[in-house]
Image (cartoon, rainbow, N blue to C red):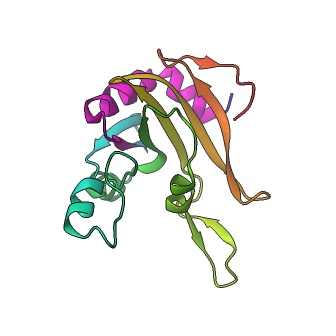
Amino acid sequence: MSELTGALVEAGLLPLIYRAVEPAYPEEGCGFVFEDPESGLEVLPTANRAQRLHEIDPKRYPRGARDWFEPDMKPWLRAERAGKAPRVIFHSHPDVGAYFSDGDFESAIVRDDANAVQERNPGVLHLVVSVRAGAADGARLFAFDPAAATFTCVAEFDASGTPVESSGP
């Protein structure tokens, strides 16, 4: 178990993250985990702007909040101004399970001039929470693997936020 995974579990943050995304169901909920050098990790839920963007400009934003998340970045910016460091970006997947989708991948990367894949937020992990019928039933934590230029599952959690052994992605 990584240091961050252990810290998320020890601080009891998984249930807090689950409770933060459940009210968004049947849409995707989202937020961040930041680390304060003095007080440790904290969960910062935020609004999912995807539906609003889709309604304003459906050609530019063809998907809505049911299958896409676009977090309101105000909590991120406030936390950074306060000297806190981003550690996790989290979001939920309604009724489809906790996997790192193609859309999640595209949102989490940038491409350099040679079209090589780079992390958009280096060192920040991605937690995808499975929400079914309005209740979180587990989550998977993903980290960027620079050698493979993709995100791989580094931890899996059950409905209570307890780490579970994973048999694969």
Q: Where in the figure is residue 3, as x and y percent of width and height?
A: 63, 33
Q: Residue at x 31, y 59 (%)?
A: 77
Q: Please state the horizontal and vertical placement of residue 17, each as a whole percent of the image.
A: 38, 30
Q: Quadrant of the C terminus?
A: top right
The kind of secondary structure the magenta stretch mainly shows is helix
Residue shown at the point (35%, 64%) measured from the top left? 62
- Looking at the picture, tell me which residue is in the foreground, 21 or 53: 53
Residue 12 covered by magenta stretch = yes
Residue 11: x and y in percent read 46, 23
Q: Quadrant of the N terminus?
A: top right
Is residue 64 toward the left or the right of residue 127 in the image? left
- Tell me the magenta residue range: 3-31
**Residue 37: in sight, yes or no?**
no
Give percent across and percent down for residue 4: 58, 35
Q: Is residue 125 above or below residue 119?
A: above
Farthest residue in the right direction?
Answer: 147
Left or right position of 4 against 160: right
Q: Residue at x 47, y 14 (%)?
A: 160
Which of 70/54 is in front? Answer: 54
> Seen in the image, is 77 located left or right of residue 34?
left
Magenta segment includes 45: no
The reply, left or right, for residue 121 in relation to residue 44 is right
Q: Quadrant of residue 95 in the image?
A: top left
Can the viewer see residue 48?
Answer: yes
